[in-house]
């Protein structure tokens, strides 16, 4: 009676592991790790709840029950070892499954020999064999498991008891023990979920605390090192790291340099200094590093743009290759600092307080806050660029003011001629030049020139040309001699690719005569009032600075002018002005302009031409310096 009552509990208890598995799967436990446990729990229920009863009633079937039990226990052992392998840093690769199957095969052979071919009481031998195999499985589990659990040992103990003592109560002990294992496993899973929830909540609080601290300490990017130092200290304190560093990528030299360090940071390059090296010495070593070796962990992180959590540094070959320094590095996080696919550097967080190891939560926080370091580097880069631009702008403005001082600040008044002139640079410093010179012979020098190129280089050549020209005019004989000497001085002092075209006019107010020497400048537009016609004169010559001696190429000429005539001089910035459609103003439009506006005064012609050029451009940017010089007789 009691036996029947106890046997009725067997299906209920054997179904308990299956019930627990269904609960775990419903609770969203990762299915990829559970299908073997599910198969075991189904087999466990079918064998103990249903199949074993029928097998025990079959003639000579009773010895098969220990074989079924041992098969499930082998499956049970394999699952436990696999479970611990999944969590262990170095999974077991020994052939423990094969060993278990061999032991199970030996036991099946013993059952076959002694239970079916021998008569009682010899059949007890398989029971002893089963006990030995159960003990072997227990030892196998102990040798394979990282943390052997006593409750698993009890499974083997109760199996041995249930094999020798056929009372149902001992089989119930075996079933209850396995059910208890599943209960503990379920509780561990629940506890792990609770720990994860707690960890996530702590990570959220830590994240919020770091954000608040970052907002207080990282708000001024004018000093890069101070900003990075504040960032590193805030991050390290937030995740309880001992040290951290930022390595900046040098794009030109293709290497990483340590920019800033927090805490006692052990350099991540090979070295033979002892582990007790002074903290300041470690900092100096780190700052002196130039990392360009492809096998270095910082290089790999930066070049691959892939962050990495090295939880156990002692098992990473890249860390072990650092020699004596590796002994001080327990755990490590590396995160690349990138902006729009541009590599800026690598953030390294090294070792955790209280000899703990970094986990996924720490890695997430480092990844999350690495953007602050990226922001600091880009903000500082932009700030430096703006400062450089402001400095350059100030220098250009200064250059513009200096150059403006070289251009005539007043238009001279001279008998028989009315003048107007201006230079509008395309940049702050232009390469065009015009000037009025009081010559020693009492005549008036009128100069217009154009230096190749634009900007600072052209402005420097123009300044040099101004100095040489004014120096030569103190010993003036004629425009031809002056430009021969200027060319000789200029050709050896400017770059081979630089040159300057120039027209030098000399007006004699007494004789009312105009002479000029050309050095490869633009056409001269001369409107003859008496003939009511425009003459376009090719100026000729060769630009200054192109050859060392221009004396045989240039020559002085006379331009016959009379009252009412107009002469327009210009640089190529006028004819090469481009509108919004890409069309150039050209010489023909300039010729038409002179013919149309020749009746105006010299100043009116100048301002009218600037207005015409502006209207023609229709908003298009000025591409070259524009210089206009008008002579009205």
Image (spheres, grey):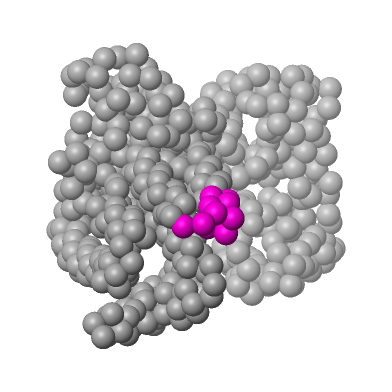
Q: Which residues are the magenta region?
A: 109-120
- Dominant SS type (magenta): helix
Q: Quadrant of the N terminus?
A: bottom left
- Give the tally of numbered discs: 0
Relative to residue 362, is residue 41 depicted above or below? below
- Residue 552 lies, in percent from the top left, at 84, 22
Residue 401, quarter of the rendered image: top left
Q: Residue at x 84, y 46 (%)?
A: 538
Residue 344, quarter of the rendered image: top left
Residue 466 visible from this viewpoint: no
Q: Quadrant of the C terminus?
A: bottom right
Relative to residue 328, is residue 445 depicted above or below? below
- Residue 12 lies, in percent from the top left, at 33, 83
Residue 47 in the figure: left or right of residue 232: right
Q: Residue at x 77, y 68 (%)?
A: 583
Q: Residue at x 54, y 31 (%)?
A: 294
**Most foreground residue, 399 or 505:** 399
Q: Is residue 396 magenta?
A: no
């Amino acid at each position: 009676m009691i036996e029947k009552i106890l046997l009725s509990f067997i299906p209920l208890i054997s179904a308990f592991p299956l019930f627990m598995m269904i609960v775990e799967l419903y609770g969203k436990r990762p299915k990829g790790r559970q299908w073997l446990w599910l198969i075991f729990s189904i087999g466990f229920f079918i064998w103990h709840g249903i199949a074993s009863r029928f097998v025990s009633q079959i003639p000579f079937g009773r010895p098969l029950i220990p074989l079924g039990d041992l098969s499930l226990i082998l499956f049970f052992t394999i699952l436990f070892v696999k479970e611990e392998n999944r969590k262990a840093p170095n999974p077991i690769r020994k052939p423990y499954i094969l060993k278990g199957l061999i032991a199970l095969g030996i036991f099946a052979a013993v059952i076959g020999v002694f239970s079916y071919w021998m008569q009682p009481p010899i059949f007890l031998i398989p029971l002893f064999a089963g006990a030995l195999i159960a003990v072997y499985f227990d030892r196998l589990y102990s040798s394979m498991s990282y943390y052997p659990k006593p409750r698993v040992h009890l499974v083997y103990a109760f199996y041995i008891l249930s094999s020798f003592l056929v009372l149902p109560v001992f089989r119930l002990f075996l079933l209850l023990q396995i059910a208890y294992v599943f209960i503990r496993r379920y509780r561990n899973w629940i506890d792990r979920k609770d720990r994860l929830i707690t960890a996530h909540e702590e990570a959220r609080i830590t994240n919020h605390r770091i954000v608040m601290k970052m907002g207080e300490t990282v708000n001024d990017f004018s000093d890069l090192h101070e900003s990075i130092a504040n960032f590193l200290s805030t991050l390290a304190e937030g995740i309880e790291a001992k040290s951290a560093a930022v390595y900046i990528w040098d794009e030109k030299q293709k290497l990483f340099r340590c920019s800033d360090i927090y805490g006692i940071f052990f350099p991540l390059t090979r070295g033979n200094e002892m582990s007790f090296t002074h903290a300041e010495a470690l900092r100096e070593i780190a700052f002196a590093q130039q990392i360009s070796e492809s096998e270095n962990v910082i290089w790999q992180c930066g070049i691959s743009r892939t962050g990495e959590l090295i939880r156990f540094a002692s098992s990473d070959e890249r860390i072990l290759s650092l020699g004596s320094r590796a002994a001080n590095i327990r755990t490590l996080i590396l995160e690349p600092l990138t902006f729009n696919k541009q590599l800026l550097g690598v953030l390294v967080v090294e070792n955790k307080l209280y000899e703990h190891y970094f986990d996924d939560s720490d890695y997430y926080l480092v990844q999350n806050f690495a953007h602050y370091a990226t922001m600091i580097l880009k903000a500082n880069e932009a700030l430096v660029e703006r400062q450089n631009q402001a400095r350059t702008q100030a220098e250009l403005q200064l250059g513009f003011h200096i150059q403006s001082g070289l251009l005539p600040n007043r238009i001279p008044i001279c008998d028989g001629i009315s003048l107007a002139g201006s230079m509008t640079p395309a940049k702050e410093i232009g390469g065009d030049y015009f000037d009025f010179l009081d010559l020693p012979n009492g005549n008036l020098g009128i100069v217009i020139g154009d230096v190749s190129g634009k900007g600072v280089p052209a402005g420097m050549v123009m300044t040099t040309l101004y100095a040489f020209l004014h120096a030569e005019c103190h010993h003036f004989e004629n425009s031809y001699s002056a430009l021969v000497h200027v060319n000789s001085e200029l050709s050896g002092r400017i770059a081979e690719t630089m040159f300057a075209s120039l027209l030098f006019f000399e007006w004699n107010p007494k004789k009312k005569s105009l002479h000029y020497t050309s050095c490869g400048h633009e056409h001269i537009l001369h409107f003859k009032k008496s003939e009511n016609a425009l003459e376009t004169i090719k100026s000729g010559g060769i630009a200054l600075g192109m050859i060392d001696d221009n004396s045989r190429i240039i020559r002085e000429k006379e331009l016959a002018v009379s009252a009412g005539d107009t002469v327009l001089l210009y640089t190529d910035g006028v004819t090469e002005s481009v509108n919004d459609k890409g069309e150039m103003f050209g010489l023909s439009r300039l010729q038409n302009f002179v013919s149309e506006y020749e009746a105006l005064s010299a100043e009116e012609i100048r301002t009218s031409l600037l207005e015409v050029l502006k209207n023609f451009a229709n908003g298009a940017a000025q591409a070259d310096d524009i210089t206009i010089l008008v002579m009205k007789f």
